[in-house]
């Protein structure tokens, strides 16, 4: 089954960093970091989107590529470029995932 990416309109959302960026690990034994199709390392970042009506589990984790370890401050506001949502299934588990092309400080002006 092909994975379908559903674009997310972020124009009415703001995102606050809710944790530290972490490399997405393929193999815990070797510490190998997962890469995207272009060969860039992938990282995950917990974010609190606002407005948000999910009181029990308000944080989403977004995966994004970066050439260097991302320096993103906890509690800072960020803007996401190319955010998509997708459905995954693996080993009898399933869920929604989020991926974006870039995480930038919200204070930066759009190019």
Image (spheres, helix red, strand yellow):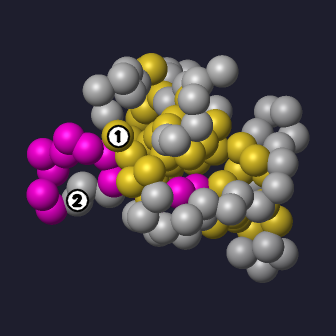
- Disc tally is 2
- Residue linked to disc 2: 57
Q: Look at the numbered disc 2 and give the secondary structure of its residue.
A: loop
Name of the residue lying farthest toward the right: 39
Q: Earlier in the sequence, mark 2 or mark 1?
A: 1
Q: Residue 6, percent across and down?
A: 43, 21
Where 81 sits versus 75, above or below? Answer: above
Crowding around mark 1 (Cα neighbors within 10 Å: few <14, some 14 to 19, many 20+) is: some
Q: Is residue 63 left or right of residue 48?
A: right
What distance separates the C-alpha of mark 2 from that of mark 1? 17 Å
Q: Residue 55, percent across and down?
A: 12, 57
Asked which quadrant contains residue 40, the reply is top right
Judge depth for marks 2 and 1 and give the one in front.
1
The answer to whether residue 55 is magenta is yes
Q: Is residue 26 visible in the rendered structure shown here?
A: no
Q: Is residue 13 left or right of residue 91?
A: left
Q: Look at the numbered disc 1 and give the secondary structure of its residue.
A: strand
Q: Is residue 15 left or right of residue 109?
A: left
Q: Residue at x 79, y 73 (%)?
A: 31
Q: Is residue 33 left or right of residue 89?
A: right
Q: Residue 27, percent across and down?
A: 75, 68
Q: Residue at x 57, y 29 (%)?
A: 109
Q: Judge by depth and name the residue closer to the eye, 85 or 67.
A: 67
Where 13 sits versus 7, above or below? Answer: below
- Residue linked to disc 1: 14
Asked which quadrant contains residue 101, the reply is top right
Q: Residue 56, percent across and down?
A: 15, 62
Crowding around mark 2 (Cα neighbors within 10 Å: few <14, some 14 to 19, many 20+) is: few
For the magenta stretch, what is the residue range? 44-56
The answer to whether residue 9 is magenta is no
Q: Judge by depth and name the residue closer to the eye, 6 or 48.
A: 48
């Amino acid at each position: 089954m092909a994975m379908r990416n559903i674009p997310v309109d972020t124009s009415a959302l703001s995102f606050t960093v809710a944790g530290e960026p972490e490399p997405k690990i393929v193999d815990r034994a070797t510490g190998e970091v997962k890469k995207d199709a272009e060969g860039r390392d992938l990282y995950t970042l917990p974010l609190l989107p606002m407005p948000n009506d999910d009181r029990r589990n308000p944080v989403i984790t977004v995966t994004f590529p970066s050439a260097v370890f991302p320096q993103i401050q906890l509690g800072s506001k960020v803007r996401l470029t190319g955010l998509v949502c997708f459905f995954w299934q693996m080993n009898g588990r399933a869920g929604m995932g989020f991926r974006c092309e870039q995480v930038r400080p919200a204070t930066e002006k759009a190019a």
